[in-house]
Image (tube, rainbow, N blue to C red):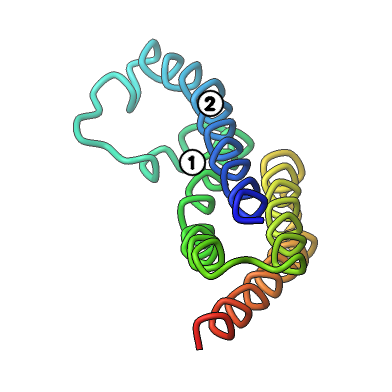
Amino acid sequence: MTAQILTPAAVLVLWSLVMLTWMAATRLPELAKLAKQGGAGAKMRGGRGQDLEGRIPDEVNWKAHNYAHLMEQPTLFYALVAILAIMGPAQDTVIAAWLYVGLRIVHSLWQSLVNTIPWRIRIFTLSSLVLLYLAVRALMATL
């Protein structure tokens, strides 16, 4: 059962790397365009991704926004999965872990392709509730 709770975490790591690749594949051509135009890309030193806001198309930046999100809340998920793996996960926590990962992938696709806020908030809220469930189960397992 331990491996079963670790698999969703491994899938989310792999998905994060897919988003990193997608972000790079869409951003690098835009940076090349800026450099050719003598814009920010040509003279940037020590810049950050946020510096590209308003300089490249929003649809391109959406992938970067989502990648950043995958480096935020899911870190709690990884900690919870580790706790549950150590304590011996139950079937409900394995299902919840897969639900969380599925919702995060749907959130990534929605934010990267459509990005309407009301639905994005709904998807994020659902995934947060699943994360809360996992947190409560991890606490119960450790008490």
- The image's mark for residue 97 is none
Going by the numbered disc 1, the residue's amino acid type is Gly
Task: Tell me residue 13's x, y (percent).
Answer: 54, 42
In primary-sequence order, the first of circles 2 and 1 is 2
Q: Label 1 neighbourhood size at 10 Å, few (<14), some (14-19), many (20+)?
A: few
Cα separation, mark 2 vs mark 1, equals: 22 Å
Task: Tell me residue 80's x, y (percent).
Answer: 52, 67
Task: Tell me residue 86's x, y (percent).
Answer: 49, 64
Q: How many marks?
A: 2
At a point 46% along the width and 51% down the height, the residue shown is: 71
Task: Tell me residue 142's x, y (percent).
Answer: 50, 82
Residue at the disc numbered 1 = 54
Q: Is residue 5 left or right of residue 110?
A: left
At a point 61% along the width and 38% down the height, the residue shown is: 15
Residue lying at the far top in this picture: please name it. Answer: 36
Q: Is residue 15 above or below residue 74?
A: above
Residue at the disc numbered 2 = 21
Q: Is residue 120 left or right of residue 10?
A: right
Q: Quadrant of residue 126?
A: bottom right
Describe the element under mark 2 as helix, strand or loop: helix
Q: Quadrant of residue 90?
A: bottom right
In front of the other: label 2 or label 1?
Answer: 2
Pick whichever, 109 or 115, lies toward us. Answer: 109
